[in-house]
C-alpha cells in the first residue's frame, strides 16, 4: 500500500481539530480538554540529519521508559550520559515519558532494541 503523504496527515489532523472545536463550540475549552485534544494529535516538525559515522557505528537502541517524576528523569539522564560516554554512537538512547504514571506505580524500564528486543530492567518487576 502507498504510504500517506505528510500533507495528507496535516489535513487529517486539521480536520480532526476543527471537528473537535465544532463539537465543543458552545463552551470554552478548559486547559484539560485542550491537553486531551492535543494528546491525540499534535504536529511536530523535525530536521532530519544524516550522520554517516552514526550509520556506520550504530549497534542498538536503548529505551528508558519512565514517568515524568524528577527522580526518574535524573536516573534516565545519568543512564544517557553513561551510555554516551561508554559507547558513543554505537548506542542511541531515548527516554520515553509516560505521562499518566504515578510515583507509586513503579514504572521505570530499560529496553535494548538491537537484533532482538530485550527488557534489561523493570522497577515494577523487581518490586514484586
Image: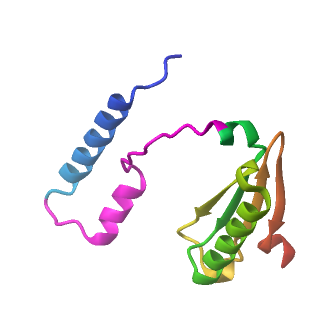
Colour convention of the picture: rainbow
Q: Residue 64 at x, y = what percent?
A: 69, 63
**Picture quadrant where residue 71 is located:** bottom right
- Describe residue 77's horizontal placement relative to residue 112 as left or right: left
Q: Residue 61 at x, y = what percent?
A: 72, 49
Q: Which part of the image, by quadrant, shows the C terminus?
A: bottom right
- The residue shown at (83%, 39%) is 115
What main secondary structure does the magenta stretch of the protein show? Answer: loop
- Magenta-span inclusion, residue 128: no
State whether residue 50 is above or below residue 8.
below
- Magenta-span inclusion, residue 50: yes
**Picture quadrant where residue 4 is located:** top left
Q: Residue 23 at x, y = what percent?
A: 22, 52
- The residue shown at (26%, 39%) is 15
The magenta stretch spans which residues?
26-52
State whether residue 83 is above or below residue 47.
below
Amino acid at each position: 500500500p502507498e504510504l500517506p503523504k505528510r500533507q495528507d496527515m496535516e489535513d487529517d489532523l486539521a480536520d480532526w481539530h476543527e471537528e473537535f472545536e465544532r463539537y465543543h463550540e458552545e463552551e470554552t475549552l478548559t486547559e484539560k480538554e485542550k491537553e486531551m485534544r492535543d494528546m491525540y494529535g499534535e504536529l511536530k516538525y523535525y530536521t532530519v540529519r544524516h550522520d554517516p559515522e552514526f550509520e556506520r557505528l550504530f549497534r542498538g537502541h536503548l529505551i528508558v521508559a519512565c514517568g515524568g517524576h524528577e527522580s526518574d528523569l535524573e536516573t534516565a539522564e545519568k543512564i544517557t550520559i553513561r551510555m554516551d560516554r561508554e559507547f558513543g554512537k554505537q548506542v542511541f538512547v531515548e527516554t520515553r515519558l509516560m505521562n499518566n504514571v504515578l510515583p507509586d506505580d513503579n514504572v521505570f524500564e530499560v529496553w535494548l532494541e538491537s537484533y532482538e528486543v530485550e527488557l534489561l530492567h523493570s522497577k515494577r518487576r523487581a518490586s514484586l
